[in-house]
Amino acid sequence: MKPQNIIECMSNFDGSALDGHLLKLLLAVLETGSITAAADRLGVTQSAVSHLLDKLRAITGDPLFVKRGRGIVPTARAEALAQPARDMLHQMQRFAQGAAFDPLHWQTELTIAANDFQRDLLLPALATRLRSAAPGVTLRIVPSGAPSAELLRSDACQLVISPRPPEGTDIVQKRLLEDQYRVFYDPAGRSAPLSETEYLAADHATVAYEARRGLELDQLLEARGVRRRMVVRVPGFAALPAFVRGTALLTTAPSLMGRTALAALAHVPVPVACPSLPMYLIWHVRYQQDAAHRWLRAQLQEVLFAVLPPGRGAPASASVALP
């Protein structure tokens, strides 16, 4: 039966027929732009998605998605329903959880935005902890880039870990740690750059998460008149070793990268004045008092202390923020 015919014969549906499954379906199809991809995300068959989508069309009185070429595109009505759907799902979750929160019974997909530095340092340990304490949680990690407030306002993610908190009176932040930069190099390709002259005379590799926008460190040094010759720019710290290994290239990165992606490289202090690098946990104010979210933030704080135990092996250049 065509969607329009379904809408006409089921026009007596009202809002009481709406449930969380239909709201999740709407968002899944909107965000993936595909019936097949939505079915994969929800763990159901394509026919089940089509059936539920027909029901949702009948309830809303709108086709919601129409064909364009071999794909589908949302109608204006579907796009307008996205934020109300997210808000209702959030309210449903709070209604179901109530005052008492038990992570063992928490069933959700949790999205955290982080770039490769924060991702590799903290999130594998968080995933291990969640598998034990909250086995019903699926952890989804997306790149944060230079995060915007809209990333949290739209509920595209529930937490951001970044050195760049977006501005907004509805955005909450907590400083997790303070790191210092180090110069990483391959001893097989060159000696350690111990002077400013050696540092500035070398070729450098750096990270640019966005086109035409380098690291904040690179921008600050450039503004101070510290001119370095950048010959390689990569989209993340994890790509740097492949370019530095076996060469005379230098890369300036957070000292804690020496525990993850840059562990195979040697490193020394930066021979020019550098700012420190703070790291923040960032969320939307609507989650401030949410029991599940508060528990999650506490887990990340514990992970941080496990990764960087104060006084027991933490790099001297890194300090941990107290709770």
Image (cartoon, rainbow, N blue to C red):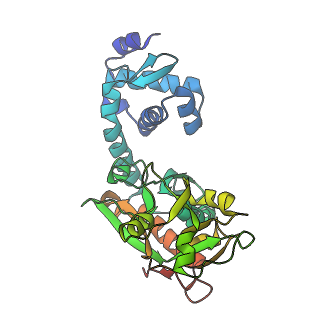
> Residue 25's spot in the image, x, y percent?
46, 34
Taking the image as shown, residue 24 lies to the left or right of residue 116, namely left
Query: 52 or 274, which is in the foreground?
Result: 274
Q: Is residue 21 above or below residue 2?
A: below
Query: 38 or 95, which is in the foreground?
Result: 38
State which quadrant residue 269 falls in.
bottom right
Residue 100 shows in this picture: no
User: What residue is at 52 percent from the left and 62 percent from the top?
Assistant: 229
User: What residue is at 34 percent from the left and 12 percent from the top?
Assistant: 8
- Count of number-bearing discs: 0
User: What residue is at 43 percent from the left and 82 percent from the top?
Assistant: 322
Taking the image as shown, residue 168 lies to the left or right of residue 1, namely left
Residue 48 shows in this picture: yes
Query: 318 or 204, which is in the foreground?
Result: 204
User: What residue is at 32 percent from the left and 65 percent from the top?
Assistant: 172
> Residue 201's spot in the image, x, y percent?
56, 70
Q: Is residue 142 above or below residue 277?
A: above
State which quadrant residue 146 falls in.
bottom left
> Residue 122's spot in the image, x, y percent?
56, 67
> Residue 157's spot in the image, x, y percent?
43, 52
